[in-house]
Image (spheres, rainbow, N blue to C red):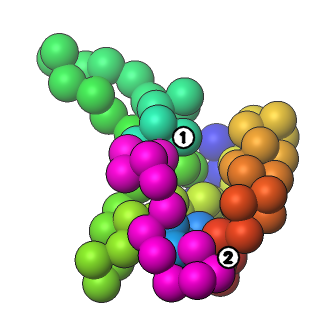
Amino acid sequence: MENSENSQKIIIEGITPDGHSFRPADWAERMCGSLSTFRDRRMAYSPLLKPITLNGIKCVIVDSILEQEHPAMYAYAMEFAKENQLKIR
């Protein structure tokens, strides 16, 4: 994996165009679970795709390196955000 210090972070916010929280409430964890691993019986999210809550809004942080390392997952995340009209920044 390349150095993530030189990568850009993309944030997908779980807020709909009408200002409501995107449902289901665990959408971010579900999306990020596809690249997660288990260590010592605990789930560990990939640094390339991880859920976070910002200002009370569920979000997913997508590291730009994901596009090179897992192009299908990157395409899925970006398409998911577009289809559901989620804010991307």
Q: Residue at x 49, y 62 (%)?
A: 22
Q: Residue at x 25, y 20 (%)?
A: 39
Horizontal and vertical percent for residue 4? 57, 61
Horizontal and vertical percent for residue 79? 81, 53
Q: Residue 31 shows which numbered tag?
A: 1
Mark 2 residue element = strand
What stretch of residues is rendered in magenta?
16-27
Name the kind of residue labelled 1 in the image.
Met
Q: Nearer the viewer, residue 41 or 22?
A: 22
Q: Report the predominant secondary structure element of the magenta stretch.
A: loop
Seen in the image, is 53 located left or right of residue 22?
left
Q: Residue 88 shows which numbered tag?
A: 2
Mark 1 residue element = helix
Name the kind of residue labelled 2 in the image.
Ile
Q: State the image quarter where residue 44 is shown.
A: top left
Seen in the image, is 12 located left or right of residue 39?
right
Q: Residue 22 shows which numbered tag?
A: none
Horizontal and vertical percent for residue 71? 83, 40
Q: Nearer the viewer, residue 9 or 26?
A: 26
Residue 84 in sight from this viewpoint: yes
Horizontal and vertical percent for residue 20? 46, 75
Establish if 56 lies above or below 35. below
- State which tag comes first along the sequence, 1 or 2: 1
Q: Residue at x 54, y 31 (%)?
A: 35
